Image (cartoon, rainbow, N blue to C red):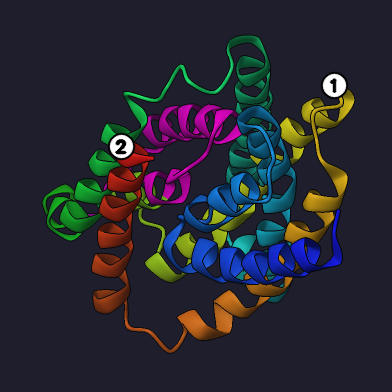
Amino acid sequence: MEPLVFALLLMAGVGTGLVGYLTGLASIISYPALLAAGLPPVVANATNTVALVGVGVGATARASRLAFADTPRRTAQQLLLALVGGGVGGSLLLLGGDDTFSLIVPWLIILGSVMLLASPRITALRGERESWNAYLVALFFVAIYCGYFGAGAGVMVLATTAILTAIPFQRAMVLKSLLLGVANIVASAIFIATGVVNWWAAIAMGVGCLLGGSLGPPIQKRIPERVLRPVVALAGFAMAVWLWVR
């Protein structure tokens, strides 16, 4: 890989890590950057998954107290489902290619964005009751999607967390990065084992993601939830449009 391309992917990775933490839409930067670097779609998708592990590592290392603030049992449940779901999604990508979800993915992201915008009202109607089992089911399917393609998966995690649990929004932001990072780890292991990862691109993007992800938690503290929530939702709509026209 040429040094200039490596440097550009590194810079794109920093933006990916920061945007991925703040909006859950890391792939809106990383995936087009990898395609622009000349990687074929499936290789770009697999390389992107490996690189995005850096976002979860960077964010969790910076805000580990929030990431693991739940009970050990509930934390273990979420991590296990993210792990298994990511493995299922990565396997589906290698079996079916990356065009299978091309029609439904934008609609999933739009649904997640609408749910996120509506979550305060839905939460008020729900009251203090949680739908923990329903949340775990939703998390499992989001983890499958994350291992398969993952664009907008962060929005989906935030929406289901806000609607089905009593987890505060600030902690949900960190938890989202942790769970998607776990899903990406197991999917990455599958991609690495099958040899579809471009390592120079993965290293450049991954180091950038690690740096950008670590910048996310302190920056998020300065942004009010009432501002960040609609920004994430609007970014989700933008991601859906980009997926339609790409």
> How far, Cα to Cα, is label 2 from label 1?
29 Å
Q: Which numbered circle lies on residue 194?
A: 1
Residue 199 or 120: which is nearer the viewer? 199
Q: Which residues are magenta?
A: 128-157
Within 10 angstroms of label 2, few (less than 14), some, or many (20 or more) residues?
few
Residue 69 pos. (x, y %): 59, 63
As displayed, is residue 31 above or below residue 94?
below
Write the residue at 79% across / 60% down.
204
Q: Which numbered circle lies on residue 219?
A: none
Write the residue at 87% across / 26% down.
195
Residue 193 pos. (x, y %): 88, 25
Write the residue at 63% across / 66% down.
12
Within 10 angstroms of label 1, few (less than 14), some, or many (20 or more) residues?
few
As displayed, is residue 82 above or below residue 222?
above
Instruction: Tell which circle, 2 or 1, labels the residue nearer the N-terminal end.
Output: 1
Look at the numbered discs 2 and 1 and tell me whether their residues touch, using CB distance below 8 Å: no
Residue 117 pos. (x, y %): 19, 57
Q: Main secondary structure of the magenta part?
A: helix
Q: Residue furthest bottom?
A: 222
Say what amino acid the circle numbered 2 marks: Trp
Mark 2 or mark 1: which is in front? 2
In this rendering, would 106 be left or right of 127?
Answer: right
- Residue 143: within the magenta? yes
Name the element at disc 2.
Answer: helix
Name the element at disc 1.
Answer: loop
In this rendering, would 216 be left or right of 209?
Answer: left
The residue tagged 2 is: 244
- Residue 96: within the magenta? no
